[in-house]
Every structure is written in C-alpha cells, then in structure tokens.
Image (cartoon, coloured by chain):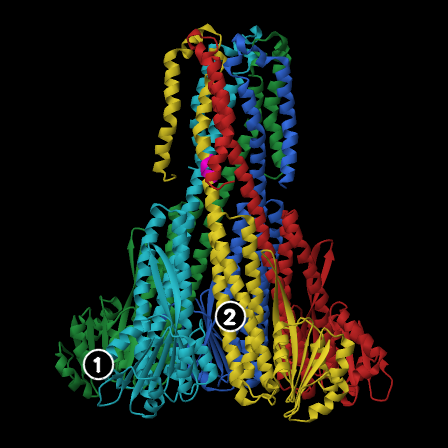
Chain colours: A cyan, B green, C yellow, D blue, E red
C-alpha cells in the first residue's frame, strides 16, 4: 500500500499524491512530505525511491529484509533501519517476530517502508492526519514521534513478560512440570531476541542525539536523547527480567532435583529395609526345615518369636542409622 | 506531600513557602531553596516544575518512574536520578524494592521528588532544619549530603547480607535443605539487583566529580569523588559477597550430591549383597527338594552348612571387593 | 591452474596472457589485469608474484595457508586474505572446510590465489568474461564484486542451518536420541567456525570502507561499507542461530532428564509397592507354618483374608501418599 | 602505637619525636620524616593527620577501613591505600584476611597507618633504623621500598597455594572425598580474593610509574614500574593457579561421577541377573507343585536339570549382551 | 655456558671472546656481538651484564625467572622477555614447561639468557656460525630470526595437539573411559597454557612492529609485523582447538550420560517386569495353600494356567506401555 501526506504551512493536508509529484514537492523546503510504503512490491517501490535520488546501495538495503537497526548518513538524507517486535500469544505460548522498518529521512520528507501495518506508525499517521500541527516541526521531529511510538510500544510487552514470570514462579513451586520449563525457555529466548534489537536501536538513537547530521536540527537532538534514555531503561528492565527467568530456572532445577532426591531416598529406604527382611523370610522358607526331621528345632517357637522381634525392630534401628547419616 | 525549606544568609529558615513564591526566591542568588515532593500527584508536581522553567522532557522523566540512575545536564540546572534500595525482611525472607529519587539541582535550589519517605532524605532535611549552617555551602553541597546519606545507607544492608551468608554457610554443612537453596538464590538475586543500581550511580558521581557543570562549584567536586570512592568500595564488597554466595551454592550442591551418592551407594551395597542371598534361599525353597524322594540329599546337613557358610562369608568378600574398587 | 583476463578500454578482452607480459601490461594504467591462480604449485606462483614486485613477506604469506582474514597495506598494493566456507553435507551430517582466498590488489590489477575452485570467484570471472564493462570500474570495484559474491554465498548456508535447526527442534520433542544431540553439537561447531571467519572479514571490510588506501578509490569505499553491513547482518543471524541451538540443547537436556525422572519414578513406585508385598508373601511362606501344628492358626482363613485385603489396599494408600508428596 | 623516624643528612637518626614537632621538621626540605601509626585510636590519629594539613576527606578515608587500593593526588601529598593479604593456616584450612595500609606521601615525609603489624613495614622500618642511608633517597623511594616488600610478601603465599594444589591433585585421584572438594573451593575463594586485591594495586603502581606527581621524582618512576611488572607476574601466576584449581575441580567431578556410574552399573547388573533367577526359583516354589499329584511332573529331574542349566548359563549370556551394549 | 659470536664486516667470525673485550667490541658500531648465556650462575652473569651498562632493575629481571613476555625500552637497549613452550610426551601424557628467554637488544649486540638449550636459539646460532652473512643485517634482524624460530617452533606442537584431538574424538564414541576424560582435560590445560604465553608475546611483537625504538631499524618493523601475524594465526588455531576440545568434552559427557540412561532404563524395565511376577510366585508360595484343605482349590489347574498366562503376557503388555511413554 502506498499512501502519502503532504503538509504545507497554511494549507490543508494533501493526501494520495501521485509519485510523479514527489520531486516537485520535495523542492519546496517549507513543506513536509511523508510517503508510506506498506508491503509494496519491489516494482512499485524502486521507481519511487529512485525518484528521490537515493543511492542504489541504500535502495538495495531498503528493499531487502532482515537488517539489523542501523543509521547510514548519505549527506542529504539519512537511511535508518529500526526494528519492531511483534509478539503473538496463542494461549500461554509466545510467538515473536521481528519486523523491519526502513526510513529515509530528508530535510523535508520521510519515506517509510515496512511489510505489515505497525501500530506505532498507524498512530503517528492518524495523529498527523487529525492535527496538521504535528507536522509543522519538521521531518526530524516526525521521525522522533515514530521512533518514540515504537519504543513506547515495547513497554506492554515487558509488562506481559513480567506477569508471565510471576505466574511461572508460583508454578515452579506448586506443580513444576516439563511444560513449566518449556515456558521458561520460551521467555528466555524472547528476552534474548528483545535484547538483540534493543541494543543496536539504542546505538542509532545515540548517534541521532550526539552526531551532527545535515537533516537533523541540533535543537531536536534532545528528543532523540530522550528515546535513548527510554531504551537504556528498557535494556535495564530486560536485564532484570533475564535475571528473574534465570532465577526461576535455577529454582525449577532445584525443585525437580530435590523431588528426584526424595524419590531416590524413598527407593533406597524401602529396598534397604525390605531386602534383608525378605532374605530372612526366604531363609526360613528353605526346604531344609520343611519336612526333614533333623531341622525341626529351626522352626521352633523360640526362633519364630526371635525372627518376629528382628522384623519388628529392623525399621526402628534403620531409622536411627539414617538419622545419624542425616538422611531424614 | 509538598514541603519547602528556604535559607537566606543572616535570616531564619523559612518553611511552607507557597509555590507561587518559588520563582521570586530563586532569583535571589544568595539564598538556597529546597523543595521536596513526596508521593505527590502529577497534577500538583507539574505546575511547580514548570514554574522553575524545566524542559518538558526533564519533567516527563521526573514524573514517570523506573528510571535508571542518570545525570542530564540542562545548562542552568542538572536533572539527576538516584536509586534507593529498600530491603524488607519478613522472617528470613528478603523483599527488595528499588525506589527512585529525582533531583533537579539549580545554582541556588534543589527540587527532590520521590514516592515514599527516604530515610537519607529525612535525615538531611532534619539536619538542615536543626542547623541552618548546613545550607550555607550552596545547593551542590546539599546534593552531596543527600547522595552521601543514600550511599551510606547501603552499608547496613551489606552487613545484613554478610551475616545472612555466614549463617547459611553453617546451614549448608549442618542440615542443607531446599529451603537453604531458596535463601541462597534470594541472596544472589538481591546482590544482582544491588549491583545493577550501584554501577550507574557510580557513573553519575564520576560525572559530578570530573565534568564541568555550571551549577557545581569545582571546589566541591572532591566531595563527589569521595562518594564515588564509597561506591567503588560498595561494588567491591558486592563482588566479594557474590563470590561467597557462589561458593555457598557450590558447597550446597556438593553436600547434597555427596549425600545422594551416599544413598545410592547404600542402595547398591544392600541390593548387591541380598539379591544373591535371596536367590540362594529361593533355590532351596523350590519344590524339587520338598517332598520328592530323589532330591532328599539336596537338603542334607552338609549342603545346609555349606549354604550357611556361604551366606555368612558373602558380606566379608563383598567388603573386600568394594574396598578394591575404592567404594568404601 | 593459471588464467588471466586483460581489459583495455575500447579493446576486446584478452586471455591466456603469458606471465612475461604482466609487467608490461601493468605499466599501462588504463587497463585492468586479473591473474587467477588456482591450486598452482609454489614453483609456478613464486616467479609470477615476484614479477609483480611484491614484498617477500607478502609472497610468503600468500603461498602458505591457514591464515586468518587480514589486510596488509604495502603502499602500491594491498594484500588481502579472505575466507570461504565450504559446507559439504553427507546425509544429515555437516562437513565444513574453511578455504583461503589470497588477493593482491594493485591500482590496475588483481592477483587471486586459492586451492580449489570458489563459486564466488567463478561467477565473477564468468561475468567479466561475458561483459567487459564489469571491468571498467577499476580493480577495487572488481575486488568489491568478488568479496560481495563471497559474502552473499554465506546466505544459503545460513538458511540451510536454519532449516536444520527447525527440523531438530521437532525431533527433540518427538523422539530425542543421542543422534539428535550429535547433530546439535555439529551445528554448534559449524556456527562457531562460521563466526570465527565472519568477525575478521568484517574487520577487513571495515578497514576498506574507512581507511585511506592508495589503490582504493574513496568513491568506492561505500561499496565496502555495504559488504560490511552484510557481514554485520550475517553475524547477527549467526548469533540468533546460536541462541536457537542453545535453546534446542536446553530443551533436549530437559526432555531427556524428564524422561529419566519418569523412569526413576516408575522404578521407585514399583519397588516401593512390591517389596513390602513380597515380604508379606515371604513371611507366610516360612516353614514355621507349613507343617508344625502349633502354628496352624497363622494359616487360618481369617489371616488369609486379612492379608488379601492388605495386598489389595496397598496400591491405593500408596497412591494417596505419593499424591501428598506431589510425585504424581 | 605511634613511632617516628627522622633522618637529616649528616645527623644521626632521631626517634620518638613528639607530634608537636612534626610541622617544624617537615618544613626542612632536606630531612625525611616517617610517622607510623599502628592500631591507634581515631582520637590519637586525628590531630596528627590534621597537623600535616591533610584534607578532611583524605583523613576520613584513612581512619575508616575496608578501602580498595587507590591513589588520590592532593597536590602537595598523595594519599595511597595498599592491601596486605594475611593468610592463616590452621591445619589444611586457609583463613585469609585483607589488611589495609594507608600511606600519606609528602615531599619529605611519609605517614603510614594500619591496624596490625605488617611484616613488610617492620622490615623496612628495621632497615631504615639499621642503616640511615636507606632514607637518603627521599620519601618516594621509601614508599617504593615499602610497596616492594608488600608485593614480595605475596610470593610465599603463591608458593604455598601451588604446593597445596599439587597435593590435592594427587588426593583427587587416590581418595577423593567431600573434604577434597571443600579444600578446592577454599583455594578457589582464596585465589579470587587475591586477584581482587592484585588488580587495583597494579593500577596504583601503574599510576605512580606513568603519571606526573609533584611528590614523586620522575627518575624514581622506573622503580614503581618494576613493582608494576611484579604485580603483572603475580596476576599471571594467579590465573595459572586458578586454571589448575579449575582443572582439579573438573577431575574431581569426573572421578566421582565415574565412581557413581560404576556403582549404578553394578546395581543394574546384579539386579538384572538375579531378578529373573529369583523369579525362576519362586516359580518352582509355588504350592501347585508341592503336594498336589497332578503337578508332580513339574518337579521331575528333567525340569530340575533344565532349570539348573538355565541358572548357570544366565550370567554367561548376560555378559555377552552387556558386551554388545559396550557396558563392560 | 657462556658463548659468543662476533661479526665484523669483511672479517671472519670470532668466537669465545673473553667478557673483558665486550665493551671495546660494542663501541665499534659496524660489528655485531652475540653473547649467549645458558644456565649460567648469577655470579657469572652479573658482571657481564653490568659490563654492558644495563640498568640494575633490568639485570634483576633477567636473573630472576617466571616473567611474562614483555618489552622494556631502556633507550640504548631493549630488554625483552619471550617464552618458549617445552612439551614432553611420555606415552599419551603431556608434560608442558614454559621456559623463559631474556634478551638484551642493543644497537650492535644481543645478549640472550636462558636456563636450558632452546632449539630455536641453537638453530639461529648454527646458521650464524655457518654463514656470517646472516649477521650482516644488524642486531634487530638477528632478534627477528630468533623470535621467528621460536614462533615457528610452536607449529609442530599445534599439529600434535590436533592429531591427539582427532584420535580422542574417535575414542569418545568407540570406548569412552575416564582415561579419555583425563586426556581431554590435559589437552584443555595445555591449550590454556599455550594461550597464556601467546597473547603477551603477540603484544611484544606488536610493539616492535609499531613503536619507535632507537635500536630497531624502522625498515625492519615489517618483519616483526610478520611474526605478529603468525602469532595471531597461532592464537586463532589455539581457539579452534579449544573449541574442538570443548566439543569432544560435550560429546564425551553425552555419550557417557546416554549409556547411564540406558543402564538405568534396563534396571527399571527388569525390576518393573520381575517384581510383580515374583510377587505372584510368592503369593502362591504361601503356606495357606500348602497343606490346609480349605485352600486346595487355590492350587487347582485353572488358577495355575491363569497364572501362567499372566506371567507370559506381562512382558508383552509392559512393552506396549513403555512404547506409549516413548521409553523404547
């Protein structure tokens, strides 16, 4: 989908401008043009981008996918790649996708390319559409608003993850199952993926806040600094959450291991108690004493009662012995 | 809660100044104004902060929460975020919360914002109230006192943790339980959380001690350097404590693993000893020898005594065999 | 194999030029000479390289193998080592080899040396052969094309690995076997090997994109910057894949461990249930009660039915007990 | 304990100088005053340190404890913190304590503060007392001698640890016990503690060797460089020892794990062999065949010999089966 | 052993020059003197080194041992420490020792000190002895040759380790034993030791290649750069080998763990199968049914055949049940 917004001071917002007009509009330094390309084919995008006079390498980068966030300074314009994290929940499962947002920032225009609708973009678009004054601060300020919306949109995700960890932590102690472990691994992977896109985006914002670019008004740098600080905070939260997941994993392993130890201890206690007793019963079950006269005294009441006492005392002495070995 | 302190050389301390007067007081460069906002609503804070002429982004940061410690230089004033670690013990459990303290430091005023009473702030406030001379060294010196109190307040926590580790180390060897492990994990998490707020605060103090700010008297930098050194020391203690927790975890695992090995060894020894003996008793319990004449010699005294000797010698040879395999 | 390409503006491409002519051709600054040495003996290579006047140390490096990617600036020419990853699949097994490509880049010539045919080189060669205009942008642009082909050729490998991980992840949950683990270790090793050659090559491209070399046209630096960005992206993908492999390993271990726990639990339950019951049957199998009159009441119907009830109730109580210990 | 040494060229050493004289002596630039305070109360130290005109913050630091090694340049004097590792052996146990040594280095005086006698200090003191020429090279050279003695004193500790590791490595293979593991953990902790004090001291020496201080003669920097090199070497030895401890831990775990596997294998072999045999004997022990006529042929010689052969062949076939599974 | 070589252009090589002549020879800037001290006592070395006018600290360093590789610039001469790895194989065991080589490099002399004959030194000595022209490029070129020989001598070691890993990898899958693990740990330690001496030597060569020293001809820096590259390559190989060892360790653990699981599974299957069956035989072995008339029908043919069917069907149903739990 190709859509456009054109703001010129004192005039109403223009929309649906044909691509042929772009070069002309861009030449008027007082206006502001936003061209948004959503999931458009390369055939459509290429002539438009070439019309702006972008470098072939920058166009190549914009039309290919899976770039890491970066900022290329081409003098008259900046080529910026940002990432957007799409998190889809199905039940308790997390499916995450990283979407790429390519932006060309010129002195009085922005060209944005992405493959699926991004709420952060839609919001900014709607705000511009509603109130043309949003556009009067220039292209770099518009970029700030888009980037700010993107960064702000990470927050609900972080909160969802926080809640998920809380819930799993209870699960770990109440009824740990392999399913719990799966969830923890999934959260760990999600936080890793998140961290991997936060760091380079932080770097992009840092550049915008610190370096001298022809298309960024020095007075607006403070806004990018603000986004940078938000990304630092998000990164910090991410670290905390990863610590929590790590702690929950540790707890899970210790709970499961402890249960295993408990099970093995039971096995050992039962075996250690009943094996000797079974041997005793087996001993007196041998045919030596059954019918042969010489062994009759082995089945006398005295020996029987002795055996009985032995059998009854065994668990008691065993308990004492285990006590001494600090097993119970 | 909104409260204020105003010091002017040669005059008594003024309190409960209405917000409208702030701009006027701030204009008098010889005075010192401290505005403290504790858990105030955004509606109350916003006009006060705007009255000082702070940048909207700085005000936004101050009114939102969960920032990491940082220092923003806005020329006429500094915006500083510090963290305060609240540790609540319930029984042997540790509940930690990180509180945020926002400070605006101007040439002759300080505005502090936080959500719950912070002892370090209360102490400084009381000292200022008691002795106006505390305020005569200027706003940056007041900031030093607040920061110093905050950093000093970490020390008792560190000592508590130290004592807790000592106690757990004994527990590990005397009666290790999953509860011990839980405590160790909790301490580990606490030390991680502590480290995460120590490092950026160290950076803030380093900046105050090294960089050139309009509102910090170069002569006072040495004081921030001193706090920086305290934070270095705290970080070092934190590292040592984390090593100790790591060591206790290692010990726990080795104690528990050793006990498990002990248990499995017992299981194996008992099984290995009694299984063959039970087989022997089972062998002579078969009906072949019970009543059928041709097998009567199998239940003769000779064989019985041989079996008896076998049964009695078995544990002895087994001990020798285990000895050779270095099991016992 | 020694092969040559010589491009001179306005003339047809010349091939199979005898080595003696090289110095003469190189002196003509408008032409472009590409000498490709594939798996040639040192005896053949040495005089050719010496003919170009390369430094003995550079020649030594080129004739020896197993260098890490690097770039040496010798003033009139650059000596560059790139790596090429050859991945051979036999069935589900991965056999990887790192091939070395040595390149001498002069102002109007390129000398490339490698041991086996490299598709990236062959492609470029064919393109030059087909369309002489490919050569008209100079030697540094030719280097760009070769390097770009090499870097592009990593992509299918990355995709193969991605597909392999997907398949193994299913295997982990459906029928994990030691074979699965072997595959995961192999993938891990492959990704490690890949990472080890990506990082220094990135550094080489970074140098070409940033530093000032006599034989690289400053206008062409942007192309090497582009390859640098591709390598950054590949490195990022590599990191993601390593995370996935790490996650699959974690899952494998947890699945296998869980199965083991399951097995041990079964063992314990069976043993704990049948050991006491076997003892009971053994008790009533002793000869005391067999034929001796005084013990006849021990085999009375009442005791038998009591024993029977005991045997039948045992599993039920055991289930309750395990329930309480959260084993089942 | 307060003690003093005063050297003046051509005059005998003076001792036990009253603190009131310090300022006068320090004014004579040709002399050298060493004031040593060992375990003195704050009340005694404070006026002496104030008499030298030290900054209150530096005095605070000197009177408090548990600082990390550092160097503060106060212009006319340096404030230096060094650490001293006290290792107490009781039996095979290691008890380590880190002692702090505070030094004020002026142009012609040294003030040293510590809590317990430090051999490195005592040695230097005795050498100065014996031979006044030791003092003629100035205060910075005296500092070099103290620091050199401290660093040299680490060496015997390193050698003791080396010997201890050697002994434990033998123990690991001959008779590994939980005690062995405890020793290894203790050594690991000791090496960690050592490393933590080596690194910042190295930094202090590096500063003395490289930076320009008013009270350090540039010609003497080479001596601090020498101590720096010793600390580099000690750090390197520390790393090697930590590798050795890590290796011994690995070996311990593998030895213990192997023994455990051995034990479990025995358990399994015994159980797998005797369970079926016990079943066979149990089968022929059932009452079906005991006295009831129709089953008499089940106890015939043929079946008995068959059973006997089965019992005797079982271990043989089991061995073959285990062989095939590479268990034995 | 003290030995000397003296080269003067146009004259034959002189040997066995008495130490008294050294200063005179060194004064002649066209000659080149090499003094080699092998395992000489401090008493012999001290006057010789002092005769060259070396700084006492440098002499101290040279006469003590266990230094890490380093380079000290003393203006008129460099003091260089290199390491040499001696690997002694006894059987399949690796015994490694790190030997130290101290070199003083002057404008026209080299003094080398080491404790045992180093092949790299012997080779260079023999080459100089054979062909005096080796010496005509100056002292720094001689240093290059020595260092080059030392670095080259690591290569066979690396190849030996490579072969050893190959062999162990086969062993891991064919017949893993604790011995295999020991070998892997030994290789790991060896590679760690190697890495620890490669890194600082690389730094020394980097300094020689980059920094400006009075005694190193700028034209010769390229040679040290070459050694630096070799060390980079060796370091890279070392990393690869460590990855391989790590992979082999992983494989070992997984093979052993898998075998253990196999063993435990067998134990559980056998126990789970025969425990109930043994209970059944025990049940019918009780005396209730032996001689007492009321229970005779319990030993009737019907019940016997039922029991027999139960016993025969048990393994079959058990197989199905295990199948469902994916155990087999």
Q: Is residue D40 visible?
A: no
Single out the residue that lies furthest toward the right. Answer: E12
Please state the chain letter of the residue tagged with numbered disc 2 in the rendered image.
Answer: C
The location of residue B318, given as percent across then percent down, is 61, 30
Q: Residue at x 54, y 81 (%)?
A: C224
Q: Specify the segment rendered in magenta.
A: C263-267
In the shown orientation, is residue A87 left or right of residue B289? Answer: left
Instruction: Reply above or below: A118 against C323.
Output: below
In the image shown, does C303 or B188 lie closer to the viewer? C303
- Kindly state the secondary structure of the residue where label 1 is placed: loop
Q: Give the SS element for disc 2.
A: helix
In 3D space, how far apart are the residues under numbered discs 1 and 2 (Cα atoms)? Answer: 43 Å
Q: Which residue is mark 2?
A: C235
Which dot, 1 or 2, sits closer to the camera?
1
In the rendered image, the vertical position of residue B163 relative to residue D260, given as above or below: below
Write the residue at 87% across / 84% down. E12
Nearest the eye: C75 or D190: C75
């Amino acid at each position: 989908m190709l859509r456009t917004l054109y703001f010129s001071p004192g005039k109403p917002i223009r929309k649906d401008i044909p691509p042929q007009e772009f070069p002309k509009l861009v030449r008027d330094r007082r206006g502001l043009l936003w061209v948004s390309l959503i999931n458009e084919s390369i055939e459509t995008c290429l002539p438009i981008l070439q019309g702006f006079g972008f470098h072939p390498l920058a166009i190549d980068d914009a039309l290919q996918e899976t770039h890491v966030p970066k900022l290329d300074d081409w003098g008259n314009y900046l080529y910026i790649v940002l990432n957007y994290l799409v998190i889809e929940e199905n039940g308790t499962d997390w499916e995450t996708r990283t979407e790429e947002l390519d932006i060309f920032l010129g002195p009085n225009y922005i060209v944005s390319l992405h493959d699926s609708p991004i709420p952060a973009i839609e919001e900014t678009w709607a705000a511009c559409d509603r109130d043309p004054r949003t556009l009067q601060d220039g292209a770099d300020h518009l970029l700030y608003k888009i980037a700010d919306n993107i960064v702000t949109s990470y927050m609900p995700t972080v909160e969802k993850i926080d809640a998920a960890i809380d819930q799993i932590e209870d699960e770990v102690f109440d009824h740990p199952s392999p399913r719990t472990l799966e969830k923890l691994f999934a959260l760990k992977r999600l936080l890793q993926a998140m961290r991997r896109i936060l760091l380079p985006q932080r770097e992009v914002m840092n550049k915008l806040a610190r370096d001298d670019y022809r298309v960024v008004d020095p007075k607006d740098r403070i806004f990018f600094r603000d986004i940078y600080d938000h990304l630092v905070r998000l990164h910090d939260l991410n670290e905390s959450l990863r610590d929590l997941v790590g702690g929950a994993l540790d707890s899970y392993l210790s709970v499961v291991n402890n249960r295993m130890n408990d099970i093995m201890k039971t096995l050992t206690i039962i075996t250690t108690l009943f094996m000797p007793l079974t041997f005793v019963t087996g001993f007196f079950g041998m045919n030596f004493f059954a019918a042969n006269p010489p062994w009759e005294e082995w089945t006398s009441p005295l020996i029987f009662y002795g055996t009985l006492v032995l059998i009854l005392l065994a668990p008691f002495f065993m308990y004492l012995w285990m006590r001494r070995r600090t097993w119970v």
